[in-house]
Amino acid sequence: MRHRAHVAMVLALAGLSAPALATEPAPAPARTTPAAPTGLAPATPAEAAPAPAAAPAAGPAIKEPAAPPSLAAPAAATAPRGLIHEAAPRPEAAVRIQQRFASKAKLTELSAGFEYLSRGDFYNSPGVRLGAAYYPLESLGLEVRVSHYWSSLDATAQEVVTTTGTLPDSHPPGWVGMAGARYSIGYGKLIVGGLGGILHFEPQAFVHAGIHDNGGEIGPSADFGLGFLVFLMPRLFVRADVPVTLDWEKRYSREVTVFGTSPVLSVGGML
């Protein structure tokens, strides 16, 4: 019984001393948490626990200034090496301009050839032609030419003369003199295997005007056409011309325009 009373007395003394101990100020926490804003529910014990200190945010990357061109490493040192250490050099394209085989600028051309005038006038008219040209430019020449024809009646006209005793009212071609211009359209060359060489040629165009003397009848004449010149040597050539001819003739009752053609094959040289 005494022992029980002694224990009760000790408990009573402990109960009286508890309020005195409770009045002692509690030590301040090392870290305080800011109070929740008004109107929000109080944080739970887990939320009230202090959060670990956040790591400092990484700032913007600082670019280092690029080295000047003189200090920069060469591109060949940084470029990855392949199987070929250096690029193969490209072949250099050589531009070659070949001089003309023959030149006509500032030169005089002389030519002579055979021609045949056909204009449906009941005459056979073979003839010869002499020509000269001066080339102030490589492609342009100023030309004069003279042609003479030995004209004779063809078989049809001779039969008419034999049976009826009449002659055609056309005049036999005799002399023609003209002046004009000749233009070289281009210049080319062609390899000819059978001849074993290169053929140098020029296509040409021409136009002339002048007068004719056909059996005593004198009147205006003109021609125009195309030619093909082939150089045998730089100063020697062969040329074929195919002109269309126009003659204005006075017949018995009227003046007529007579069309014809006179192919010419000539040879010439440059001086």
Image (tube, grey):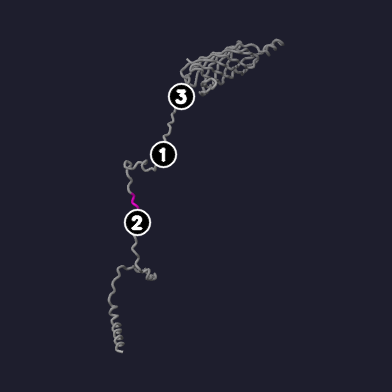
Mark 1 and mark 2: span between their CA atoms?
44 Å
Q: Position of residue 266 (x, y in %)?
A: 55, 15
Q: Amino acid at mark 3?
A: Gln
**Where is residue 78 drawn, in percent x and y?**
37, 43
Label 2 sits on residue: 58
Which mark is first along the chain, 3 or 2? 2
Q: Which residue is mark 3?
A: 98
Residue ID at (33%, 63%): 53
The N terminus lies in quadrant: bottom left
Q: Position of residue 230 (x, y in %)?
A: 53, 19
| Stretch in magenta | 58-63
Identify the main secondary structure in magenta: loop
Percent position of residue 39, x then y: 39, 70
Pick the front one: 222 or 152: 152
Q: Secondary structure at mark 2?
A: loop
Residue type marked 1: Ile
Pick the front one: 126 or 148: 126
Reply yes or no: does residue 59 show up in magenta.
yes
What residue is rendered at 44% in x and 26% in y? 96
What residue do we see at 70% from left, 10% from top? 162
Residue 84 is labelled as 1
